[in-house]
Image (tube, helix red, strand yellow):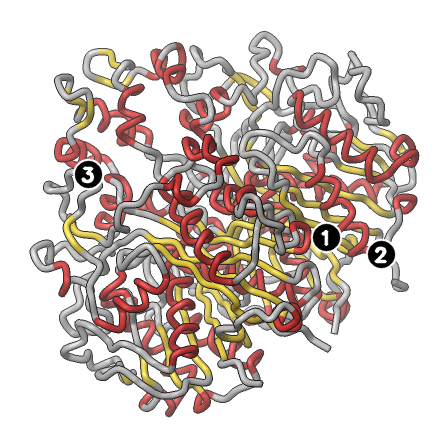
Amino acid sequence: MKHRVVITGMGIICPLGHSVAQMWEGLMAGKNGMGYNTLFDASTFPTQFDAEVRDYDISRFVKNAQPHIAGNRGSQFVVGAAAQACKQARIDIETDRPADGIDRRRMGVYLGAGEGSVNNDAFFQSLIDSWIEEKQQPDWNLWVKSATSKMTPIQELEQEPSMPAAHVALLTGARGVSRSCLTACAASTQAVGEAAMLVRYGKADVMIAGGCHSMIHPLGVTGFNRLTALSTRNDSPQTASRPFSATRDGFVLGEGAAIVVLETLESAQKRNAPILAEVIGFGSSSDAFRVTDMHEDARGAVQALRRALDDAGLTVNDIDYISTHGTSTSENDSIETKAIKTVFGPQAYKIPCSSPKSQFGHLIGATGCAELITCIMAIQENTLPPTMNLNEPDPELDLDYVPNKPRKTPVNIALDESFGFGGQNNVVIIKRYTQRV
Amino acid sequence: MQRRVVITGVGAVSPLGLTSDQMWQGLLEGRCGLGPIRNFDASAFDCNIAGEVPPFNIRDYVPKSHRKATKLMSRDIELAVAASHEAVKNSGLISKADEGKTPTLIPQRTAINYGAGLIACDLAEMAQSVRLCVTDGKFDIRKWGSEGMKTLTPLWLLKYLPNMLPCHVAIIHDIQGPSNTITCGDASSYLAVSEAAEMIIRGDVETALAGGGETRINPIGIARQYLMKRANCSSNDNPAAACRPFDANAAGTIFSEAAGTLVLEDMQTARNRGASMLAELVGWGASHSLNPDYTHLEPDGKAITYAIDMAMQQAGITPDKLDLIIPCGTGIPSDDKAEAIGIQNAIGASADVVPVWPTKSLLGHSGAAAGTLDMIVAALAIHTGKTGKAVNFDSPTKDCKLNLLRQPLNKPLNYVLCCGYSFGGQCAAVILKAIKD
């Protein structure tokens, strides 16, 4: 038996704020979360700015922060996002005796969760302390003395990408299926999609799904800078994320966490939980092309889109809004546009598609679910978030990207797409909830 | 009619050899794959033994068209590529990797779902860059930003993304269906295989490669594990006796490197092409251990019980039907105790009877790969009607009532249960069944 899957709660910690309301207000007001890097000294890096979560205080969201304060930045954020989502979904947290009517063995966690930063003091200094000039390599016996004097077990453990889910499980008491995935920038879209499948096919009644990630640390920025994936517009961080613009030069690295509560319709109705939207389609694919580049004809993205439409039983005429991956890199925005045109044909020009990354940056593993939340809001508010900084259109990119200001328009069905390094493609389709299918 | 999922191919690289057959023979003979670390000079490390995979040349496992990309393979990726090479061959499918032959693997109807760990970067390579960034003996991040990072290869980051394990495998074999990377620590394999089976059942694909790969045999990987007090640091001079699952003298686990890949297929599809079927996947379950000491299982192993319950329920069997259990059995005393209690509570009186065969005393703990190795062992045990025995199990602890295998079995096995867990708390169980006409 297949269950209808509805969304009953959502929460977000992102560079535009620490709640869905703040994020949406920021999107509507044309604000952005960009600024110079305050997390480490990036003054000589090719990219010196980012989109940070500022002034985050986990104790605003939970009674007992103690089990979570050692968590990596992503884990800290995801606890706040999950707490918000559970509150909205009327799920009791931080209790051994929940009275919300959910059997904890039927409630699971599925995150697209990133790894934490290495312990930077230990990591870099130990390589210097152990370097043997004559041999031109480190001496591991010297290394281990230096490194282990600075490493702590908890900080090492908390780097593991399995840990954010551990925090969410402990917070919520979830005892059902727990999975986390890390498929680069597509991770939380995939997590939400697969979690929806677990609910649809009866492996769980409730899934707390989404993602979290922070790569705003020296090795993270180094990695993306070496790939020349980041914008280097150091003189203008506020306008650096400009998806689909002719002058785009890379993405702006963000961080954060986004969570949705997925639930069978029966469970939501039984508990009188608010129904925010319904998940009706999921599609996933692999480019199987190159480690470094997307397939030039977007074959993976095309297949993921078609799989999702097929899964939802929709045609190309049914989609009211596409929340793009829209990273502001030359490659992604071109190939993504090509994919939309290939799948939607002439209809592509009639479907507004925008990129909130122009405002909150690229939250990496967390980005897909953050954008899914903007889709939920678009449906609720019948308003589309804009693509900001789109002042110099790229002649090749000629879709309706909702440039520079939000748009009021009826939205019943929205599609969220995410693509990741390595050819990961994931698409989730949501719909305004109505009693009839 | 609901689809059924069978295993039609297996592949493994492990400390016991470069093929699943070598691993299997080693386990039957009781050969131990653990020994002094050769990968780097570990003599000053508290734990300096591990289970290393015998030397191999990755180029032997990669078709000409993908040879250049071997430069982008971290050790974890190499292991996954090698194991998947054997699995595809073993299944009788012809993939794009068999250059010059007509493939029978259908790209868009094949998925890949792989478990991966937190991949450690190559510290020796990193040191070459970090040493250039020193001021007064200390790491100077400004020099790193302006000079040091530029000496890293541009594609550096791509070697360490967990989804690059399945990404390379997907490119090599042209797998264009859904691709996921499960990052749930030591439970990753089970969860990846479970999800791959779900993809087949729900009709997304007919075939899936699923498994896991990981190495922790590098300076930071080994140091991390003994800082977390998971590694046995007292048996460096006696590797063969070092890992003692469920034994009263157990003092921690020994880490190893490995990858395992299963080819899963819809039973009808497998039959239609005349594939040989090793076993059927009939049940899987998962749960989350809730323990603020995230490094270890909760003392009553409740999540293990829940995961096994869920798997047995799906399989539609009672505990007395089980013919063999392959537990996680790490040799970490508190975890072994919790796991034993968890299994005992799941299967009740059958705990006295059902034989239990831990494999880590010979294979070591290969993290994200471990569960797949055990599922391969389970499939081969079913297929051959043989087992090895519990090695290093000399004196039972008083809490463990499990019936550890004192003597190898030689009889038909119908149902085999495998279970596993991770730091962070993810727990999982999978039940395999003999193929009957």
* Chain of residue at mark 2: A
A97 to the left or right of A239? left
Q: Which residue is mark 3?
A: B40
Picture quadrant of residue B379: bottom left
Q: Provide the residue designation for mark 2.
A: A313
In the picture, which quadrant includes the N terminus of chain A? bottom right
Q: Determine crowd level at label 1: few under 14, some 14-19, many 20+ residues with C-alpha closer than 10 A.
A: many
Find residue B54 and report its horizontal and vertical position in percent.
Answer: 26, 50
Q: Nearer the viewer, residue B353 or B410?
A: B410
Viewer-nearest residue: B227 or A345: A345
Residue B349 drawn at (x, y percent)? 37, 92
User: What percent of the width, then of the height, locates residue B305?
Assistant: 43, 76
Q: Residue furthest left?
A: B237
Label 1 is found on which chain of the structure? A
Name the residue located 69 percent from the left edge and 62 percent from the top edge.
Answer: A263
Relative vertical location of residue B320 with respect to residue A174 in this rendering, above or below? below
In the rendered image, residues at marks 2 and 1 fall on the same chain: yes
For disc 1, the marked residue is A282
At label 2, the amino acid type is Gly
- Label 1 – label 3 distance at C-alpha: 45 Å
Query: Disc 3 is attached to a residue of which chain?
Result: B
- When asked about the image quadrant of residue B106, the answer is bottom right
Is residue B431 placed above or below A349 in the rendered structure? Answer: below
> For the point 27% across and 46% down, which residue is it?
B55
Which residue is found at the position 47% from the left and 58% from the top?
B87
Secondary structure beneath dot 3 equals loop
Name the residue type under label 3.
Phe
